[in-house]
Image (tube, helix red, strand yellow):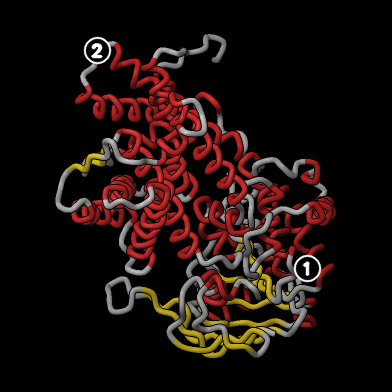
Amino acid sequence: MLKLKGIKKTFNPGSVNERQALAGIDLELKSGDVVTLIGGNGAGKSTLLNAVAGVYGVDAGSILIDQEEVNGLPEYKRASYIGRVFQDPMMGTAASMTIEENLAIAMKRGMRRKLRRGVLKQDRDLFCDRLHLLGLGLEDRLTTRVGLLSGGQRQALTLLMATLKTPKLLLLDEHTAALDPSTAEKVLELTDLIISKYKLTTLMVTHNMEDALCIGNRTIMMHEGRIILDLGEKQRNNTSIPDLLDMFKKASGFTMADDKMLLAN
Amino acid sequence: MISSIWFGALEQGLLYGVMVLGVYITFRVLDFPDLTVDGSFTLGGAVAARLIMEGYDPWLGTVLALIVGVGAGLVTGLLHTRLRIAPLLAGILMMIALYSINLRIMGGKAMLSLLRLDIIFTDVAALVPRNYAVLALGLLVAAGAAYLLYIFLLTEVGMALRATGDNEQMIRSMGVNTDSSKVLGLALGNGLVALAGAMVAQYQSYSDVGMGIGMIVVGLASVIMGEVVIGNKTLLRTLMAVLIGSIIYREVIALVMWLGLPTTDLKLFTAILVVLAMASPIIKEKFRPVKLTER
């Protein structure tokens, strides 16, 4: 499904701020894989997601989605394959537009947009069905501007938008990190529900070890731009959070210094 | 019969309203502070005036002015998207370039008179009572443009345009080439501005190389005033606010002139008006009475 080979990315090459963010990433996701991605600050998790999404080009390597090379395609052209949810709840929606307009935009993800009415009657039924799934009552507020919603509501909506037109690959970049704990839990539940309902191949960055172990079927850990640990379903089931921290220490030679990662559970 | 000053201001409000719609597209919808407007307004006036002087049909001249304005917006858009020139600078460069171009179009003269020539309003005067020709056509064009714009902004393409101004990251992740959206918005906006320029030149019976100076500020003042009075709850309401804002602006200008402000001070007055409108949230905050119940 997704195949990364030798992905390298260096920011500000040739300057004093030169930093290698990805130092050769090889990764293969099978169709239906739900992979959680963990690692300390600066490990390259977000860079990897952004490289796959095409936010910036990579220096070396190839990115295949369904055997098709997408490396070199601009971000907007990769959109037909990829649904994304960002860390910042404000990032995934257009605040000045209504809920139904945002959803209508999402329904045309990666498709040619034409000079015909953007929100159609028959779409509204679909929107209501999907919004109902969220259980937030948004189905009764189709013409409300998104800017009036809370962060959690907006993030749930973004999740819906990313998956409204079933993507080949879903990228979640710490999408619950900016929410309060109970909202985060709710959004995570919804994530789980949507992923399993539509059998989405997913790559999810998280800093929460517990989430990392209980969501999906595989966990990988990054450190200094490399994948240092790759746990399949069976190995994961026998792994506790302390085990994971131990593994990190062994594999990287560092203690997981980031308190956020320890405290997050 | 309404007193002629206020009636004239109403006519102007409608004609300039078309320009304000253009500014609304670039400045508000696209969030692109486009100074091309100052040049493209004059461009519209220059193209129409020259063609009419050369004996062409005034309607053809007006339509061509619109098309040439679209072209000006297109160039600004390409300067920004292809050559990565910052929005403000791209607009300023076009504004300066258009100054020379406009002078060339006007045959090197700073002013072209249209007195006693056939203009669009003379044709309309044959259909409606003479005194209402400008009002009728202004209303038709302004309301028509606003309505078409409303329909457009609700289409898939129009929604992508609005989202580009609202959240570029999001709309790109939804597969929209934001560069194309920006070029489209700038072309559309400047087309409307040039159309307004063409109509205003015919209304005042001359085109003047300086007629576009400060148009962006006038447009902004009108948009803000309209939004304050009419509000911006829905898209339709906002578009009506834009037109009504343009009329209010002209009436206010007529009022201060009636009170004795010299014409030459109008631009200063407009600038102060925009400053006050933009600063109003901060001013309100500063002078908000302290509630005694809050402890």
- Name the front one of labels 2 and 1: 2
Q: Residue shown at 27%/52% (left/top)?
A: B54
The image shows residue A262, relative to residue B200, as above or below, that is: below
Query: Is any part of residue B231 visible from this angle?
Result: yes
Tell me which corner region of the image, top left, top right, bottom left or bottom right, holds residue B198.
top left
Image location (x, y in percent) of residue B74: 39, 61
Q: Residue shown at 28%/79% (left/top)?
A: A14
Decide if residue B115 is on the left or right side of residue A230. left
Q: Quadrant of the C terminus of chain B?
A: top right
Secondary structure at numbered mark 2? loop
The foreground one among A251 and B217 is: B217
The foreground one among A152 and B114 is: B114
Circles 2 and 1 in contact, beta carbons < 8 Å = no
User: Which amino acid type is marked by label 2?
Assistant: Gly
Decide if residue B175 is on the left or right side of residue A122. left
Give the residue number, with chain letter if any, for mark 2. Answer: B260
Give the residue number, with chain letter if any, for mark 1. Answer: A195
